[in-house]
Amino acid sequence: MVSIFDIFKIGIGPSSSHTVGPMRAAAAFLSHLEAHQKLVRTTRIKTELFGSLALTGRGHATDGAIILGLAGEDPETVHPDKIPQILEKIANEHRILLLGNHNIRFVQDDDLLFNVDERLPFHSNAMRFSAEDARGNELDALTYYSIGGGFVISEHERESATPPDGSETCPPFPFRTADELLEIGRKNRLSIAEIVLENEKIHRQEDAIFRKLNIISNTMDDCTERGCRMEGILPGSLHLKRRASQLYRDLLDSREKALRDPLTMLDWVSLWAMATSEENAAGGRVVTAPTNGAAGVIPAVLRYCKSFHATTDEHPIYNFLMTAGAIGALYKLNASISGAEVGCQGEVGVACSMAAAGLTAALGGSNEQIENAAEIGMEHNLGLTCDPVNGLVQIPCIERNAMGAVKAINASRLALRGDGKHVVSLDKVIKTMLQTGADMQTKYKETSEGGLAVNVVEC
Ligand code: SF4
C-alpha cells in the first residue's frame, strides 16, 4: 500500500524525480557502503546519470542534488537558502564529507558524469554510483532509478520486487483500484478519507496523522505565500521573470473590480498555483503533490476551497488531502507519476485528478462523485507531453500548474452536479493514461528533445 505521506513529501525544488530522488539515492548508496563497512575504505565516489536525468539533469539541478545527498543532506531538512554555500564550499575545496563524516576528494567534472546518449532499459531516470578504494579498485556499485514523486528504487529492489518502503503490516482496508476503494466504502459505509485514515493508522496514531497533515498543509501555504512575494529572475538559462508577485499586487489593487467579475476567483487560483511553482523552480521548500513539477495544483485548489467555500466539513483540509492522497496512490500503484515515463499526464494530469477528488470530498461529495471528479481530471489531460524548455521546470510547467488547478475545479463542479454515475471509470482512465504514456515518443517524456523545448529558441 502506498501511504499518503509517500505521495505528499516535503522536499526542495525544482524536481521530485530529478532533484529529490537523486539526493535520496546518493545518500542510500552511502548508507549501503556504511552498512557493509566499505565507506571507511572509500576514496572516490563516481556517479553516472543516464536517460532523462542526463538530458535534463543540469536544468533540474540533479548535479547539486547528488552532491548534497553524498554530503548527507536530506531533502526534507536541508535549508534551501544554505544550499549554494554548501555546494560552493565543495566545489572550491574539491573535497566532500561523505554523509557528513568521511572526507574524500571530489571533482565534479571527473566524478559526476552525464551520459546523455545512454538510457537504461528499466526507467529513463537511472543513476549508477560506484565506490573505489585508494588503489582504484571498485569496492561496490549500485544502480538506482528515480521513478517519480521522489520515490527511488535500487536495481536489487527492482529485481527482487521488494517495495522500496515496504511494510509487512496489512492495512484494514487494502485497495489497489478505484473499484475496490468504492466497494470498501459501500460495504463499510466509509468515505474515502475515512478509509485512508484507518489504513494510515498502521503507521502512526490518529493525532500524529493529523499533525503530519497540518505540517503538509502549512508547508504548502508557506510556499505559496513566499511565491506571492518574491520578485526577480528564476535560476537558469531562460532568465525568466517571476510573475506571481505582480499578479498578486494587481489582484489586491483591484478588489472593487473583482466584485463585478466573478471569474476573478480563477485569477487567484492561477496566482496561487504559479506562486508555488515559481518557488519550486527557484529551488525552494515544496511538497510533492504528487511531484515537484506539479506541486502548484493541489495547494492552489486547497486554498480555493478554504477561501471561497464555507464548507460544513469540520476538517476540510484533512478530508481534502486524504482523499487526494488516495487517488495519487492509485496512479502510483497502477500507472506512473513520472514525467520521464508517461509525460506530463503523470505530473500535472495526476495532480489535477487528485485535486478534483480532494475538492469534491471537502465540498461534501459522495465517494462516487469523488471518483467521477478524479476521472474527469485525468480524462482531459490524456496525452499531455513533458517538454520543458532548456530542461528547466519553468516553461511550460509554471503556467501548466495554473491550468491544472482551474481544470480540477471544473472537474469537481461537473462531478458535484451529477449523481456519480458516468461511463468512463477512473480505473479505465488510469489504464488509458499508462498506455498513452507507453505509446508516447521518448522525446516527449522529459528529454527536452521535442515539443516546446525545440521550438522555443533561447534568447
Ligand atoms: S512539463 Fe510537466 S512533467 Fe514535464 S517537467 Fe514540467 S511539470 Fe514536470
Image (cartoon, rainbow, N blue to C red):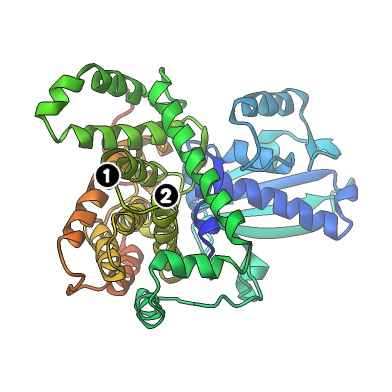
Query: Which image quarter: residue 194?
Result: bottom left
Q: Where residue 433 sits: x, y (%)?
A: 31, 65
> Crowding near pointer 2: few (<14 within 10 Å), some, many (20+)?
many
Query: Which image quarter: residue 430?
Result: bottom left
Left or right? Give the position of 36 relative to 189: right
Indicate the amino acid at tag 1: His
Helix, strand or loop status at disc 2 = helix
Camera sees residue 115: no
Real-space CA distance between mark 2 and mark 1, rounded to the nearest whole angstrom: 12 Å
Helix, strand or loop status at disc 1 = loop
Residue under label 1, please give it.
309
Point out which mark residue 317 bears. 2
Q: Quadrant of the N terminus?
A: bottom right
Viewer-proximal residue, 225 or 256?
256
Question: Looking at the image, is mark 2 or mark 1 earlier in the sequence?
Answer: 1
Disc 2 Cβ-to-ligand 1 distance below 8 Å = no
